Image: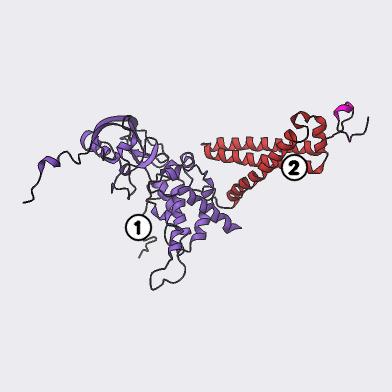
Chain colours: A purple, B red
Amino acid sequence: MTATLEPAASTAVGEVPTFQVTLKIARYIPSDAPAPAYGEPVPAGTARWDEFQLTVHGTDRVLDALHQVKWDLDGTLTFRRSCAHGVCGSDAMRINGRNRLACKTLLKDLDPSKPITIEPIKGLPVIKDLVVDMEPFFASYREIMPFLITGANEPTKERLQSQTQRDRFDDTTKCILCAACTTSCPVFWTDGQYFGPAAIVNAHRFIFDSRDEGGAQRLEILNDKEGAWRCRTTFNCTDACPRGIQVTKAIQEVKRAVITRTF
Amino acid sequence: MTTIADPKAPRAPRPGPGRRVTRGNVEMASWLFMRISGVVLVVLIFGHLFVNLVAGGGVKAIDFAFVAGKWASLGWQVWDLLMLWLAMIHGANGLRTIINDYAEKNATRLWLKVLLAASFVAVVVLGTLVIFTFDPCPAGAAAGTLPSFCPAP
């Protein structure tokens, strides 16, 4: 008997169900006026909510819905995305009031019976639609010196580390700098000067790395009025982290390290 | 021949005033104080509540004589003084943090803190004065309302 395709069985199996969703997207269109000199007020753009009705599949993520809007309905919708698989950290946004990655959030998990609200992450200046100015966020990141600092001569081989030593900071190596944690922090919303969870997490990654020798410097930087002490342990950052990093715990460990260093 | 002063590539200055560096152990001390004073206050306040409301005659026994009797002993003076100072510093420091978190304008922040400092000083000074200058046997009071150790008028 020869193997043949059986066309009757192939259609029904594996078909993904479709359903209707409404996206409610916060739009911000910047003014066309030329950019003013630094320090002058930026001319206000127009802000509004746009709603889009879509037919989506059960396997679609919020990012797929945004693509559908941008590619088929309204090409002026602006948002960031790069890898679309939860690694680059470009598409953090406020979806139904929570900071998440659009590429890791399935529409079917969001109660499609109600409109799904999508806003830019809070606390950073909006440039257009869902795109915010990430510069204040990265300025804090640069300030904690997110690179290996060593004093002695370079070894001829790799810098060795035991599994236990690695486990000490393993959680905070997962950060993808999406800013979901920092822009979910109420202290950061009202005072943009606060270093923010992401900077402290990335400092933690080096402070507790046995190969790094810049820990004291980083603790000194974070022992600032705007540093680790501004954390109010509201756990918004831990809830927001799309990588599941225990952000608040890392901040507490940095606080403890500052205290034990002093006494 | 002219020398090139700065051969580095031109770079636009960072926009904005940037973060002011405010390092030091003040915020750490304040953070630690809140934890330590919190634990001490739990003991002080529940001890206070138990002695005043439960032990002995209970809440009905509180009168001038009861308070005067307590404040005549050094132990209760120290207890109440500690409670007053720790609670006031703890509370004022907490309010200071809230003002820092929520005041958006520098002027608002400054004035709220001035108000806070003024009320803090007023309460602490008045409370301390009361504890130390309290007279358990005021002249001319009816004998029945005074603590038992007062000399008979």
What amino acid is labelled 2 in the image?
Answer: Trp
| A9 relative position to B60: left or right | left
In this orientation, which residue lies closer to the viewer: A31 or A134? Answer: A134
- From the viewer's perspective, tell me whether residue B39 is left or right of residue B20: right
Query: Along the horizontal axis of the image, is B58 left or right of B151?
Result: left
Q: Kindly identify which numbered label has been placed on residue A11.
A: none
Q: Quadrant of residue A70?
A: top left
Residue indicated by mark 1: B9
Q: Which residue is mark 2?
A: B79
Q: Are marks 2 and 1 on the same chain?
A: yes
Q: Marks 2 and 1: CB-CB under 8 Å? A: no
Q: Which residue type carries mark 1? A: Ala
Where is residue B49? Give x, y as percent.
Answer: 71, 36
| Residue A48 spot, x, y in % from top left | 34, 30
Report the span colored magenta.
B138-153
Viewer-closest of A201 and A78:
A201
Mark 2 falls on what kind of element? helix
